[in-house]
Image: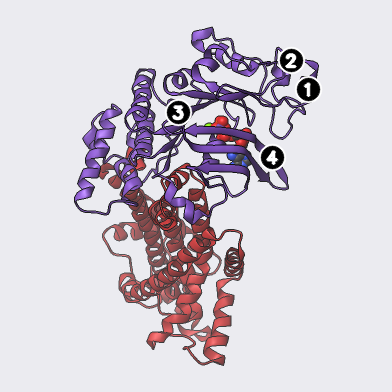
Amino acid sequence: MLGYLIKRIVIVFGVLWMVSTLTYFTVHVTPGDTATAILYSIGGENAVSEKNIEHVRDKLDLNRPVYLQYFEWVTNSFKGNFGTSYKYNKPVLYMIKLRLPNTIKLGITAFLISVAVSIPLGIISALNHNRIVDHLSRIFTLLTSSFPSFWIAIIFIIFFALKLKLLPVSGMDSPKSIVLPAITLSLGMMAPIIRMMRTSMLDVMGQDYIWVSRAKGLKESAIIWRHVLRNAIPPIITVLGLQIGHILGGAVIIENIFSWPGVGGLLIDAINAKDTPMIEGCVLVVAFGYTFINLVVDIIYACIDPRLKYSGEGK
Amino acid sequence: MENLLEVKNLNVSFLMGKRKIHILKDVSFNIEKNEVLAVIGETGCGKSVTGSAILHLLPENAEVGGSIKYNGIDITNIHENEFRPYRGTEIAAVPQSPSTSLDPLMKVGKQVSECVTDKKYKYGEHKKQLKESIINIFSKLKLPRINEIYDDYPCELSGGMNQRILISMGIVTKPKLLIVDEPTKAIDWALRKEVIEVFQDLKKERRCAMLFITHDIAAAKCVADRIAVMYCGQIVEIGYTNDVLNNPKHPYTKGLIASMPSRGFHVMEGYMPSFADLPIGCRFEPRCSEKTDNCSKYEPQMINIKNGYVKCFRFKL
Ligand SMILES: Nc1ncnc2c1ncn2[C@@H]1O[C@H](COP(=O)(O)OP(=O)(O)O)[C@@H](O)[C@H]1O
Ligand SMILES: [Mg+2]
């Protein structure tokens, strides 16, 4: 188990390194001059002048070849120094520490909402499969997965914030502010969980050992709780892990629409300003969240499924 | 003797899309108290479907006709809630295929004990007794490491060990009727004798009646009082074990016995017809070496013999 863990952690670092390298050069090859983009994002059109551009280039060492800049960034990152944001002129780590808690708060709320809705809905669909409840749930999943989240966000804002005035339009000023962004974000991740829960339940219910538990004369509720759910849950954990990754990506869009001060908003701003150290910081946070959660999922898996202990996977 | 189970003209068909596939046709047999009836026949002839029908555990797409009486009570159409108390306590099952019949995420001891805990005893001191009696069964079945095995998962045991766990599940509740499906299939030859002895003991000591489904004729010979031979969804011959094995009347029974390794391994030619495309006359006619002109035109009737019947035109009393 320990060897397996170490192997996995090494992989996490490898993934982070690859992601950050790819991001670094992708940002570099995107069209547009870095110094101009920074000036524009700070002072608007008037700030962009020959003199200012030269000044920024000098100050940020942008005239050096890109591989040297990259090399310096990597070395510093290993020492825990992720550089200074071009735009905000503050350490990247400081900015992220400021914003990350908000993203986590939004993400966890959205995750809990979607689990609280999707898992029971998936179970109910499976238990009533091909009956009316199941069809309704299928329509619900179809709707939530086919409308883009930014569109749903706008509809929510128009309806609940502007028309009914029940909830704030944006920002993070009141405790109610989290409701709309969290629901929007959660809707986007419900469909796969509902589908997977339903499929997984139906799959287990068709297994021989469920027939056997009926032959034992167990009550239907005992069969569902003790045998069906326990066996249907493991595949769901995988999907949940993937969906948490989805939250991190979805947050980028949702945070911008609702002006939620999280890492997502920071990332979009950084991209607009070609603020490479800031982009790298945000991307690393997202990538780390993703890989870390997948690691956690695998560990949970190994703990609940005795078969993995013997297949070599979990060793 | 009194009949514990009376199955009369049992018909089972499955709806497959728009089509209806008729599997069991007019299956009739009785099992007396403390009697073992073996059902033999090749794979896919409907043995397991018969067992499931008695347990009311056919899939949703199944249609059941005819009548099943248990202890004089007609249980053919009784409601699930009324029938559930019968399962496990009155009629228990030892399912086929040990590799898929155990819950992979539950310890095997728990899987055996839940047959009982959900019904009679609740927790407390009984739990300890229960564990003892289960370990007792394990040791009778010659399971190794009986104390540790209780807390093992199915994946930690071999196929033969899991098969014996399934057997423990069937007998732990001391049922009056046990439906045993292919109990010797996954068992090593060395252990087969022990497993067969367990069923013999069960019959002698616990006075448990059994529907003993198998294609292991030798096992049937050791355990069964009577044997029913099934071919393609019908019982073609049924009678006392000795009569059926030593003096088979139906050509299919003769073929089955000739195909036993101890009788020369003469495997029958041809295949069982598909249930979707059955012959008009006798279902065995295409493979039969003794067929007459009538065989392909009409279905043979049941001819009653001592404690059973034969379904063949050739057979004359
Ligand atoms: N749920 C089902 N739907 C359709 N056909 C089935 C179903 N269960 C069993 N059958 C068919 O019934 C026949 C008998 O099956 P079974 O009783 O399992 O055979 P066996 O004698 O080997 O136990 C097989 O041809 C099988 O295809
Ligand atoms: Mg079978």
Neighbourhood count class around disc 4 (C-alpha, 10 Å): few under 14, some 14–19, many 20 upward: some
Q: Amino acid at mark 3?
A: Val
Q: Name the colour assigned to chain B in the rendering.
A: purple
- SS of the residue at dot 1? helix
Q: Amino acid at mark 2?
A: Lys
| Residues at discs 3 and 4 in contact (Cβ within 8 Å) | no
The residue to which callout 4 is attached is B21
Quadrant of the rendered image containing residue B91: top left
Neighbourhood count class around disc 1 (C-alpha, 10 Å): few under 14, some 14–19, many 20 upward: some
- SS of the residue at dot 4? strand
Of labels 2 and 4, earlier in sequence is 4
Q: Amino acid at mark 4?
A: Ile
Residue A102 placement (x, y as % from top left): 36, 76
Q: Residue furthest top?
A: B264
Q: Horizontally, is B33 left or right of B111 in the view?
A: right
Of labels 4 and 1, the one closer to you? 1
